[in-house]
């Protein structure tokens, strides 16, 4: 299936293959503790003795999450991968992480990132490098310019201005570094001064609650985007039509913490481009970019390449797409910028990548694309594994800045909020586009820009404490547009997909016109159209009144979490003795969770003796309300994800047998999930956490820091044979245990991370895989790590998973309408004897595709376009085949 041959690992040749009945956490942890020293000499930078001590404590039920996280960080802190990842962190995060590793608790760690009473994150290495490189490059270009024969007018005076500005930039960068050094000194004093423990008792305040959503200085990943605009003000003077007097008032250009505007004005971008790059450099290839509001090494890789007809088709030079009526601001654009999705299994090179901020800009872009026969597709956080994005030599619209979508770690969930007030795609408004109505009383409508992230929407909802989406995905970094594109979902049998709560869609059509769709019948296609309708700008959602989740996570034995159809279905390694009553009680509890709970979700980490069950209901009682996860726990979870990235990319980890990799990840995962305490030799202690609904929907942060591979199917829950009006959860139990048994066919299991099951409802959207599932849907997925792909095991495993899940029937023997999640890894496998694309087109969506096209055509009749226009402008090869062939 196109996979590479398995690699040979040293430990595989040294250790005997264990019997399958031993493949459970307790045995594998013992195997690691006993034998990992065999490769110690090959990885001296890893503190293997410390790793063994922590694994020993965990194996013996001595679990302390904070201590284990601190210990695992110390285990790998001398490795190159740790140091490289550490260097990518913001300086404030470096201080906090160093403080935590040194033994600092919550108050000390949170204080290490503060300035006064405000949460403070100093500029990141990227920003400081950005400043230094920019100053250096300006100095170099200015020198070249001022010695060029063709630019002699007013040279001495202009040169004086540029020189002073370069000196100013260098001076302020030095101030930044001095402040960072002082913070490091303070942290050192905390841990090395005799009396340090008596002075650290302050409480943690994440940010100013009264002004949480005001425009604020950039944090971690907002730094480059915001700095670009401010640097333009610093560097782009009013163009001097004649000689200047050499004087410039620049004021407080940079305060060492954030970039501030200077007092004098600025020119349009082309003036500065002419100044630095001369008229002959008017085209771009190989990743060069221009930004209408900034010039820096990130957004503008100085224009130095001649173009070719192949590179730019019928265009000449950098496309200048105006974003305002006065035509003074141009859209940020990158030429030949390589694209990779978050999972790194989809790669291509669009000719142009645009980062828009206004509706007008998108209209102009589509009109320009139409004039030059380009296709336009969008990407948000790029958290899809299918080839739904742009294609070679076409146009990609990025809803987020490219630093945020191309670099890990991403600190969005732990940085202060900054939303560009000029970005029309970043708005959250109580507004009702024409024709949009709520489905019933007690609901409200909110208009959301597609570039708004789940984290921004979560903060907005929690801050206002009045309205909330009833359902959402877990990840907070993804955009509203990105969640909508492939029809994403949450959990709870009474809930439909996120797209089912859309009441209006605003988009730029194939002619560059801004349109609105609110007709309920049209929305069955328009609310889930995969980008084929046009470039969506805003989505109006129907919200529920705010409620509060009562979280009560548990860790039952795997045999009781979701009881199998037959006890013999439990692999010997996981099999324990249970009474009939225990078994029946567990089955009743599972079916109640699946049928009735507001939110129902189960995890199994490979080879773990326990499952993690996250099923809960809501209340309107705020008596015991807490912010969950708290600021420190959010930071803690973020570091866990960051360490997961370090761990899975570490050469030592990649040298371990697959079963060891899976066990370390399972151990790491389960240790850090509540409940923590053991009683009667089991983690049976139940704790209740009452938190705002959006917090519960996004209960984990930092998971984006560790890349994974993912296949998910939507399995219809059929009716019972004895009573077709009631759901039959036997198919869910079978799907769960089929995969657990599959992981035991190979001791080095390709599924090295987890299996996740969420029970949800159906969908009214034409192309949703949940459509028609009247009794609900089992949304079930298998996740692994890139090393399983490198070992040549992943694709064959996915095919086996597909064969199992696609084989299920109802009580009458009819095959269930099982379909994959559009965003996951389904394209490379076969389904019921056909390649996936062919099966979905000819079988799974045989009736839906014509209905989808007919609905789009009906929309087009009213709005002035047809399906041919849509295919030319907004399709790609995947959708050409699926929809138009």
Image: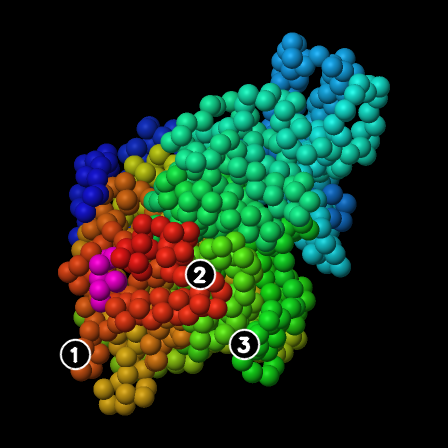
SS of the residue under disc 2: loop
Residue 449 part of the magenta segment? no
Cα distance, mark 2 to mark 3? 45 Å
Pick the front one: 591 or 415: 415
Give the dominant element type of the magenta stretch: helix, strand or loop: helix
The residue to which callout 1 is attached is: 813
The residue to which callout 2 is attached is: 865
Residue 823: image location, x then y, percent: 37, 57
Residue 656: image location, x then y, percent: 29, 40
Residue visible at 61% across and 40% down in the picture: 330
Magenta stretch, residue numbers? 836-843
Label 3 CA crowd tier, 10 Å (few <14, some 14–19, many 20+): some
SS of the residue under disc 1: loop
In the rendered structure, the answer to whether residue 739 lies left or right of residue 442 reads left
Pick the front one: 407 or 77: 407
Cα distance, mark 2 to mark 1? 44 Å
**Which comes before the other along the chain, label 2 or label 3?**
3
Residue 637: image location, x then y, percent: 52, 52
**Which comes before the other along the chain, label 2 or label 1?**
1
Residue visible at 41% across and 35% down in the picture: 313
Position of the C terminus by quadrant: bottom left
- Compared with residue 65, is residue 435 higher up or lower down, i.e. above or below? below
The residue to which callout 3 is attached is: 618
Picture quarter containing residue 309? top left
Callout in the foreground (1, 3): 1
Pick the front one: 693 or 349: 349
Picture quarter containing residue 446? bottom right
- Compared with residue 589, is residue 662 higher up or lower down, i.e. above or below? above
Cα distance, mark 1 to mark 3? 38 Å
Residue visible at 49% across and 65% down in the picture: 863
């Amino acid at each position: 299936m196109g996979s590479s041959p398995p690699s040979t690992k040293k430990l595989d040749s040294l250790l005997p293959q264990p019997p399958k009945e031993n493949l459970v956490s307790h045995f594998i942890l013992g195997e690691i503790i006993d034998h990992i020293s065999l490769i110690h000499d090959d990885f001296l930078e890893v503190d293997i003795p410390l790793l063994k001590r922590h694994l020993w404590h965990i194996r013996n039920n001595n679990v302390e999450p904070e201590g284990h996280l601190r210990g695992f960080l110390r285990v790998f802190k001398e490795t190159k991968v740790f140091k490289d990842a550490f260097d990518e962190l913001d300086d404030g995060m470096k201080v906090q992480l160093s403080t935590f590793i040194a033994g600092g608790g919550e108050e000390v760690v949170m204080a290490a990132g503060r300035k006064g009473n405000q949460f403070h994150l100093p500029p990141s290495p990227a920003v400081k490098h950005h400043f230094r490189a920019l100053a250096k490059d300006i100095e170099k270009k200015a020198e070249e310019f001022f010695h060029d024969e063709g630019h002699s007018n007013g040279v001495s005076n202009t040169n004086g201005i540029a020189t002073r500005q370069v000196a100013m930039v260098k001076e302020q960068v030095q101030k930044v570094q001095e402040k960072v050094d002082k913070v490091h000194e303070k942290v050192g004093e905390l841990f090395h001064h005799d009396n340090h423990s008596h002075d650290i008792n302050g409480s943690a305040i994440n940010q100013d609650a009264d002004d949480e959503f005001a425009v604020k200085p950039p944090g971690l990943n907002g730094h480059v985007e915001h700095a670009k605009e401010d640097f333009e003000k610093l560097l782009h003077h009013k163009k001097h039509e004649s000689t200047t007097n050499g004087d410039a008032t620049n004021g407080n250009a940079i305060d060492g913490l954030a970039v501030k505007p200077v007092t004098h004005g600025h020119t349009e971008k082309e003036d500065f481009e002419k100044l630095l790059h001369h008229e002959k450099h008017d085209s771009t290839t190989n990743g060069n970019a221009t930004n209408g509001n900034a010039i820096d090494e990130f957004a503008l890789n100085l224009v130095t390449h001649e173009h070719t007809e192949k590179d730019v088709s019928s265009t000449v030079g950098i496309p200048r797409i105006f974003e305002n009526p006065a035509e003074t601001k141009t859209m940020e654009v990158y030429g030949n910028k390589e694209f990779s999705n978050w999972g790194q299994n989809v790669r291509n090179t669009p000719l142009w990548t645009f980062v828009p901020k206004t509706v007008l800009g998108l209209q102009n872009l589509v009109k320009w694309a139409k004039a030059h026969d380009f296709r336009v597709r969008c990407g948000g956080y790029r958290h899809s594994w299918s080839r739904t994005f742009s294609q070679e030599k076409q146009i990609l619209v990025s809803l987020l800045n490219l630093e945020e979508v191309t670099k890990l770690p991403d600190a969005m969930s732990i940085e202060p909020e900054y939303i560009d007030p000029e970005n029309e795609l970043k708005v959250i408004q109580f507004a009702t586009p024409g024709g949009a109505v709520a489905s019933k009383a007690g609901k409200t409508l909110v208009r959301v820009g597609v570039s708004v992230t789940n984290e921004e929407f979560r903060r907005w909802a929690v801050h206002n404490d009045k309205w909330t989406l009833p359902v959402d995905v877990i990840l907070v970094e993804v955009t509203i547009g990105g969640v909508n594109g492939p029809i994403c979902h949450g959990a709870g049998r009474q809930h439909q997909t996120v797209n089912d709560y859309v009441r209006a869609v605003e988009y730029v059509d194939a002619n560059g016109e801004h349109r609105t769709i609110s007709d309920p019948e049209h929305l069955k296609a328009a609310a889930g159209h995969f980008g084929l309708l046009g470039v969506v700008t805003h989505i109006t959602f129907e919200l529920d009144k705010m409620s509060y989740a009562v979280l009560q996570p548990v860790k039952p034995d795997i045999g009781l979490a979701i009881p199998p159809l037959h006890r013999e279905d439990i692999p010997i390694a996981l099999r324990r003795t249970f009474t009939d009553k225990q078994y029946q009680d567990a089955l009743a509890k599972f079916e109640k969770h699946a049928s009735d709970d507001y939110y129902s979700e189960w995890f199994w980490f490979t080879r773990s003796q326990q499952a993690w069950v996250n099923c809960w209901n809501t209340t309107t009682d705020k008596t015991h309300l807490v912010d969950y996860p708290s600021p420190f726990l959010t930071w803690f979870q973020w570091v866990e994800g960051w360490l997961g990235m370090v761990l899975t990319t570490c050469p030592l980890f990649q040298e371990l047998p697959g079963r060891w990799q899976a066990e370390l990840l399972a151990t790491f995962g389960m240790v850090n999930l509540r409940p923590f305490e053991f009683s009667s030799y089991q983690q049976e202690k139940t704790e209740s956490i009452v938190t705002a609904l959006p917090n519960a929907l996004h209960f984990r942060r930092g998971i984006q820091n560790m890349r994974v591979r993912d296949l998910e199917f939507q399995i219809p829950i059929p009716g019972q044979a004895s009573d077709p009006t009631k759901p039959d959860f036997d198919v869910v139990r079978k799907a769960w245990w089929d995969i657990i048994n599959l992981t035991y066919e190979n001791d080095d299991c390709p599924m090295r991370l987890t299996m996740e099951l969420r029970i949800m409802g159906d969908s009214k959207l034409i192309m949703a895989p949940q459509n028609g599932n009247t009794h609900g849907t089992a949304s079930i997925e298998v996740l692994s790590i890139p090393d399983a792909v490198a070992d040549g095991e992943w694709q064959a495993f996915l095919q086996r998973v597909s064969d199992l899940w696609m084989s299920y029937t109802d009580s009458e023997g009819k095959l269930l309408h099982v379909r994959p999640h559009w965003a996951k890894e389904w394209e490379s496998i076969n389904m019921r004897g056909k390649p996936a694309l062919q099966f979905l087109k000819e079988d799974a969506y045989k009736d839906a595709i014509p209905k989808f096209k007919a609905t789009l055509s009906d929309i087009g009749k009213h709005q002035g376009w047809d399906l041919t226009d849509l295919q030319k402008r907004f399709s790609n090869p995947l959708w050409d085949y699926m929809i138009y062939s």
